[in-house]
Amino acid sequence: MFKTKDGEEIFVIDGHTHFWDGSPQNQKNVHGKQFIDCFYAYHSNLSPKEWLWPKEKFEKYDAQTMHDDLFVHGYDDMAILQSTYLSDFYKKGFNNIERNYTMKKAYPDRFIINGAFDPRDGERGLDQLRADAEKYKLKGVKLYTAEWKGDSKGYKLTDPASYRFLEEAEKLGIKNIHVHKGPTILPLNRDAFDVADVDDVATSFQNLNFIIEHCGLPRLDDFCWIATQETNVYGGLAVALPFIHTRPGYFAHVISELLFWLGEDKLLYGSDYGIWTPKWLIEKFMAFELPDDVAKETGVSLSPTAKKKILGLNAARLYDVDIASQKQKLTTPLAVAS
Amino acid sequence: MTIAARSHAGRTSEIWDRLRHVTDPELDESVTELGFVTTVEVDAMDHIHIQFRLPTYWCAANFAFMMADDMRAAASAVPWVRGVSVVLGEHMYADKINHGISRGLSFQEAFGSEATGDLSEVRRTFLLKAFQRRQEALLNHLMSQGYTPEQLVTMILAELRALSVGKQGQDLVGRYLERREIVGPCSPDALAFLSAEGRHLQAEGLEVYVKGLRRVGVNAEFNGALCRGLLSVRFDMTTPLPERPKMNPP
């Protein structure tokens, strides 16, 4: 919970968090090492100095640390745990749903867990999705389209197999599809980060919401164009938001483009924990004001209402969170604990 | 310094200068200014040895190959050069790219079944984005100097080249003209400003059109900042990050 100077309480739902194991013990090969090293470079590049972690903590942190970083030191009230497998890189997967579930069991009112599917898994994958949907009451999944699987270096949302999985997800009541674009996909001569397939499936699956992580970056320009035409496409702010510290001018331009093309109802805060932590992200976001020249150029404003929507109200709508009753659930045990 | 040594240094700097004109296609910035090129050596046989690196292990293979291929072509175009090697370090596809470049293979040949053709389409896509970004910067500048939409949409290339717009304006004109041919023929009487699809622009709505292009530049500048930062962290560079490239007038 973030409290403004005027005492207003802002309910925060973190749309993108991970409980991963990127440790050397879990790495299968050089790609597993390079993957977590790349995340660490994002962390090192964009975090304020006082929030830099040692590499060992970054590779693998425990449930208590994560809980405290999000909810005790940080301002998150709830967080969505995303599942990412990367089974070709990590022995037990990077952050599999079972590992996420241990977190959910420990702090049931704090976490929403999302599953994952990979259309290349065929019937076995569909069975798994059904089982996961039932066991974990899934309302969302995270898709990493650049995941390596044997000879395959990724897939598109428009592949016929992707359609089958999206149809199944819709039947199972999984309505939030988080999409993370990555650097590889075959054929390699095409643009791996192309977001055109999002446009296609968003049109075909009107009852699903597509939350594009990193707001389509590094294709923000194409993403904005697509998202403005589709009512069910959202942008997740991970990676863009931490620029608020080292390069606030860039953040101002990006957020104003997003407000201009998508609007304040379509953006979701996400810390991308453990790459970044909510404490400093939210303090800086709440204190941030668009520079006059940027606001004038785009004609948008990042008002207190817009901030509240981005930090929690939009995610609450997508995940059917009743904020009033959730607040009550969360404050009771905390009062006892203190 | 001996004459031989000086000419060796001169030859090395001549190659650096050629490489300065090779761009990262996605960022539309010079590979040398981005800090990607680490080594340029001219050996006794006038063979050139270039080494480069990228901000992450995962940078897209197609762009990495394009930069390597463009650097090889740029160095090879120098008359006294007798051979060129370009080596990419610490990248998921380093082996394939280095092998392909050393043998003079096309992207398709280097990547076999992982590719379905050459890079012309993706290259064009990003040249168009570079064109849009450079056009937005120039149009904004000219409008701020008092040129009206009517003047701009009817201006021909000969007139654009002859404009008296100061040093900054000239740089923007120069950068724009480097990409102008992508969208249509560049005869002196051709219209200076066309859309990415090669269409004529309309005076009415020109400002809205230019605002629509803004997101292309915002995206590229953001990516440029991210890439510089990741490169700096990955290779523990202690030199301060370069200033943000001034595409747009202050």
Image (tube, coloured by chain):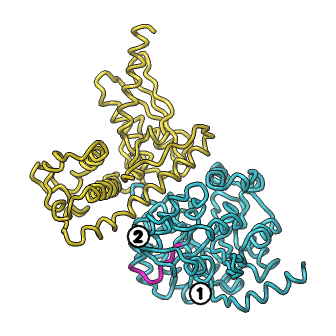
Chain colours: A cyan, B yellow
Q: Quadrant of the N terminus of chain B?
A: top left
Residue B149 higher or lower than B119, as above or below: below
**Label annotation for residue A298:** 2
Q: Earlier in the sequence, mark 2 or mark 1?
A: 2
Q: Nearer the viewer, residue A143 or A328?
A: A328
Disc 1 crowd rating (10 Å Cα; few below 14, some 14-19, many 20+) is few
Q: Is residue A18 magenta?
A: no
Q: Depth-wise, is mark 2 or mark 1 nearer the camera?
A: 2
Q: Are marks 2 and 1 on the same chain?
A: yes
Q: Secondary structure at mark 2?
A: helix
Residue A212 higher or lower than B246, as above or below: below
Residue A83 higher or lower than B97, as above or below: below
The answer to whether residue B117 is seen in the rendering is: no
Q: Residue at x 43, y 31 (%)?
A: B85
Spatial CA span between label 2 and label 1: 27 Å
Q: Chain of mark 2?
A: A
Q: Residue at x 21, y 51 (%)?
A: B181
Q: Which range of residues does the magenta coloring cover?
A: A229-235
Q: Position of residue A248 (x, y in %)?
A: 55, 59
Q: Secondary structure at mark 1?
A: helix
Which residue is tagged 1?
A317
Amino acid residing under circle 2: Thr
Given the current orientation, which residue lies at the most extreme top position? B2
**Would you identify the image quadrant in which residue A8 lies?**
bottom right
Residue A56 relative to residue B109: left or right: right
Q: Chain of mark 1?
A: A
Circles 2 and 1 in contact, beta carbons < 8 Å: no
